[in-house]
Image (cartoon, rainbow, N blue to C red):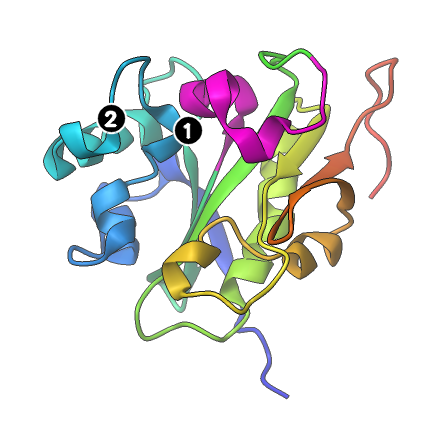
């Protein structure tokens, strides 16, 4: 059985921007999307926003200059950037909040709740895949959100690994459940909504 390499995880604003780009790559969908699909403004289409504009937006979101939390985490093995995980307050994902069907099917709650964080994307650098690195980023994302005061962390993973690589960007259900998340909805046969509650109604963080 393969073991997960020891992973050092840094908030994006404490990592070099070139390290983020190295993980995303320049030719595939991760580098093109730059974690902007769920952040498109009202009236914007993905195709209408050039790749370089999406990357510029991510750069500003990763290093917001003290105006809000960073947009994600970078994972390193032996000093080399190998993994990325997008995690922020759910309200920061404007497109997700507006109309993303998977996230809201059968659920009725305050969509802009600032205490709910969302894990929306994982990228493992080419040449480092199938080593458990994305799975190792999940507890790191939980710890990062908890340190920032999150009450709940949620994700929207695939229920199956029988998919092309690009479809697996939100992670798999097993990745989250192993990290203590519970399934709260199954909006489609291939997607789930998972949650981990970090704090009770009194605001005190729960152990673990």
x and y, in percent, of residue 158 in the image: 58, 54
In front of the other: 51 or 74: 51
Residue 55, relative to residue 178: is it above or below? above
Q: Which residues are magenta?
A: 87-109
Q: Secondary structure at mark 2?
A: loop
Which residue in the rendered view is the most extreme toward the front?
189
Left or right: residue 45 versus residue 203 is left
Q: Nearer the viewer, mark 2 or mark 1?
A: 2
Q: Report the quarter where the C terminus lies.
A: top right
**Residue displayed at 33% across by 64% down:** 125
x and y, in percent, of residue 75 in the image: 44, 55
Q: Which residue is mark 2?
A: 45
Disc 2 or 1, which lies upstream in sequence?
2
Q: Which mark is residue 70?
A: 1
In magenta segment, residue 102: yes
In front of the other: 114 or 109: 109
x and y, in percent, of residue 46 in the image: 24, 32
Residue 56, relative to residue 20: is it above or below? above
Residue 136, relative to residue 2: is it above or below? above
Q: Secondary structure at mark 1?
A: loop
**Residue displayed at 66% across by 55% down:** 173
x and y, in percent, of residue 199 in the image: 81, 25
């Amino acid at each position: 059985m393969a073991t997960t390499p020891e992973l050092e995880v840094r908030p994006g604003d404490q990592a070099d921007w070139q390290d983020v780009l190295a993980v995303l790559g320049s030719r595939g969908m991760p580098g093109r999307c730059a974690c902007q699909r769920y952040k498109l403004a009202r009236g914007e289409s993905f195709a209408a926003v050039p790749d370089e504009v999406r990357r510029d937006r991510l750069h500003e979101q990763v290093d917001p200059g003290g105006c809000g939390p960073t947009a994600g985490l970078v994972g390193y093995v032996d000093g080399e950037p190998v993994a990325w995980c997008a995690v922020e307050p759910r309200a920061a994902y404007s497109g997700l909040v507006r109309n993303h069907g998977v996230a809201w099917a059968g659920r009725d709650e305050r969509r802009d709740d600032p205490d709910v964080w969302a894990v929306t994307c994982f990228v493992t650098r080419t040449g480092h895949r199938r080593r458990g690195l994305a799975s190792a980023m999940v507890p790191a994302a939980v710890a990062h959100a908890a340190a920032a005061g999150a009450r709940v962390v949620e994700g929207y993973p695939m229920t199956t690994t029988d998919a092309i690589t690009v479809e697996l960007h939100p992670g798999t259900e097993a990745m989250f459940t192993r990290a203590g998340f519970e399934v709260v909805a199954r909006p489609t046969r291939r997607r789930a909504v998972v949650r981990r509650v970090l704090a009770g109604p009194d605001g005190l963080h729960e152990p673990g």
